[in-house]
């Protein structure tokens, strides 16, 4: 018997409501796996146990029968994940089923400091990162000098690696950025303490995934961010340092691409973005402020106000294609409930020409949105539990989005609580 593998990915710029959907789907899943990113994620779950903002712990954690795994493609911040687990435990959530790949990389204290100072130094190319050390941790991984979780279990390996690593990072930090150097014995002691804490959770994921798939289990792969911030397919350089796509899910989780059975793309009924990068349908006026207020658009990780705009069908269609999405989960429809009219960005205009593909970042930045305006419904949708419960104009809006993105609708979110979801 072969199991099923569902991947959930964002199709805008992150914060589409992936966490809510993953938590809902994980009720039926045997395993929930994060495959890239780390503490830069802010995934919100609202269920009967309360409201939770998860950063490193997969959103399947609320189902005690669901194995949760930080996969090989993730970067792990040990003190932050311990704090997150303690916070969940305090609220009565069982956390014993969280496992961590022995091959995942460690976010080290110098990565966080480098993330701060390097982003400022990028000047006009600054990314406005989450400052969680993500970029520098992946940089060390690719430079083949990174520390993996399994290294935390060996003082000898750690000492060897730090002897090579620290002088290099310290030279950069002190000379170029005027920062204090990190002291080797202190870093080593900290790493060994983290290793002791995390040891019972560190596993080789290969036999684990093999047996789950052999037993016909349901696997859920939880994406972070979206392909618009993908290192290859996003608005480079205004991106993250990993691959938040279905292809990245295969590599990062350690699942053969052929085993992926479904890819659900998640999109808000409008757009938001945190950090720099092109966003042609952005609203920099009172209307944007209104969307921010109505949608509560403040970052789950950093609390920063999110940039807001109308739904960009060009972007979501592009991201859905890159991911090979099988269906589209639309979220936050209720946020539009009071609006008399709702524009959709259906194409761009660039130097007088109409464009329907996402161009390179410099051109994308200069694109003007081409809007098609649909009438609003001006009725609350938050109690709707079936498509038939929605006002006619709301259904027409959803149908138009599905047509533009060329995907069937998997579900519609009408409020933050897991129950406020219409499964189609
Ligand atoms: P993620 O990073 O993709 O998991 O999304 P975030 O959790 O960062 O941001 C989504 C925000 O929208 C959170 O505050 C959620 O509680 C909220 N949310 C998710 N779905 C819905 C919905 O359908 N309606 C409303 N009103 N809020 C939602
Ligand atoms: P979830 O999973 C929204 C943004 C940052 C910055 C860029 C790179 O909740 O959707 P990084 O810290 O990764 O080096 O920052 O990506 N960013 C996010 N924006 N939601 C996230 O995660 C994000 N993770 C990173 O603002 O522009
Ligand atoms: Mg988020």
Image (tube, rainbow, N blue to C red):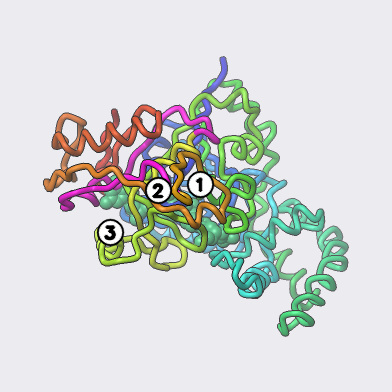
Which mark is drawn over residue 10? Answer: none
Callout 2 touching callout 1 (CB < 8 Å): yes
Where is residue 49? Give x, y as percent: 31, 51
Q: Alpha carbon of mark 2 to alpha carbon of mark 3: how far?
A: 14 Å
Q: How many marks?
A: 3
Res 119 seen here: yes
Q: Nearer the viewer, residue 346 or 274?
A: 346
The residue beneath circle 3 is 291
Q: Is residue 285 magenta?
A: no
Note whether ligand 1 is within 8 Å of mark 2: yes
Question: Most extreme residue toward the top, as rendered?
Answer: 1
Q: Nearer the viewer, mark 2 or mark 3?
A: 3
Quick check: 62 left or right of 68?
Answer: left
Q: Nearer the viewer, residue 215 or 196?
A: 215
Label 3 sits on a secondary structure element that is helix
Q: Is residue 321 above or below residue 159?
A: above
Q: Earlier in the sequence, mark 2 or mark 3?
A: 2
Q: Alpha carbon of mark 2 to alpha carbon of mark 1: how far?
A: 9 Å
Note whether ligand 2 is within 8 Å of mark 1: yes
Rendering quarter of residue 206: top right
- In this picture, which residue range is highlighted in magenta? 321-349
Viewport quadrant of the C terminus: top left
Where is residue 423? Give x, y as percent: 29, 31
Q: Earlier in the sequence, mark 2 or mark 1?
A: 2
Q: Alpha carbon of mark 3 to alpha carbon of mark 1: how far?
A: 21 Å
Quick check: 147 left or right of 366?
Answer: right
Label 1 sits on a secondary structure element that is strand
The residue beneath circle 2 is 16
The residue beneath circle 1 is 226
């Amino acid at each position: 018997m072969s199991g099923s593998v569902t991947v959930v990915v964002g199709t805008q710029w992150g914060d589409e409501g992936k966490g809510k959907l993953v938590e809902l789907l994980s009720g039926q899943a045997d395993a929930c796996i994060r495959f890239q990113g780390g503490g830069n994620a802010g995934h919100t779950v609202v269920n009967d146990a309360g409201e939770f903002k998860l950063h490193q712990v997969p959103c399947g954690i609320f189902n005690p029968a669901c194995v949760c795994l930080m996969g090989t493609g993730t970067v792990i911040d040990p003190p932050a994940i311990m704090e997150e687990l303690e916070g969940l435990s305090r609220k009565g959530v069982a956390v014993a089923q969280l496992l961590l790949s022995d091959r995942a990389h460690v976010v080290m204290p110098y990565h966080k400091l480098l993330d701060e100072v390097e982003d400022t130094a990028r000047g006009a190319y600054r990314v406005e990162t989450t400052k969680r050390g993500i970029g520098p941790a992946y940089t060390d991984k690719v430079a083949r000098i990174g520390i993996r979780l399994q290294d935390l279990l060996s003082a000898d390996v750690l000492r060897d690696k730090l002897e090579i690593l620290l002088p290099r990072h310290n030279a950069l930090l002190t000379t170029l950025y005027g920062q204090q150097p990190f002291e080797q014995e202190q870093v080593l002691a900290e790493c060994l303490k983290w290793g002791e804490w995390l040891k019972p959770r560190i596993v080789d994921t290969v036999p684990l995934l093999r047996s789950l798939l052999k037993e016909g289990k349901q696997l859920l792969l939880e994406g972070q961010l979206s392909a618009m911030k993908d290192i290859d397919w996003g608005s480079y350089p205004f991106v993250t340092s990993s691959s938040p796509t279905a292809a990245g899910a295969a590599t990062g989780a350690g699942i053969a691409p052929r085993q992926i059975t479904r890819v659900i793309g998640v999109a808000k009924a409008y757009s938001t973005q945190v950090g720099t990068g092109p966003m042609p349908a952005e609203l920099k006026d009172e209307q944007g402020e209104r969307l921010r207020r109505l949608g509560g658009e403040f970052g789950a990780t950093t609390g920063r106000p999110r940039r807001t705009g109308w739904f960009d069908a060009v972007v979501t269609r592009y991201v859905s294609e890159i991911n090979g999405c099988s269906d589209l989960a639309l979220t936050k429809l209720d946020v539009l409930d009071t609006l008399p009219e709702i524009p959709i960005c259906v194409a761009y205009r660039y130097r007088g020409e109409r464009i329907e593909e996402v161009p390179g970042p410099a051109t994308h930045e200069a694109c003007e949105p081409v809007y098609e305006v649909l009438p609003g419904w001006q009725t609350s949708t938050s109690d709707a539990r079936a498509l038939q419960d929605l006002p006619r104009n709301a259904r027409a809006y959803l149908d138009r989005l599905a047509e533009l993105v060329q995907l069937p609708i998997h579900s519609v979110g009408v409020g933050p609580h897991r129950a406020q979801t219409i499964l189609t």
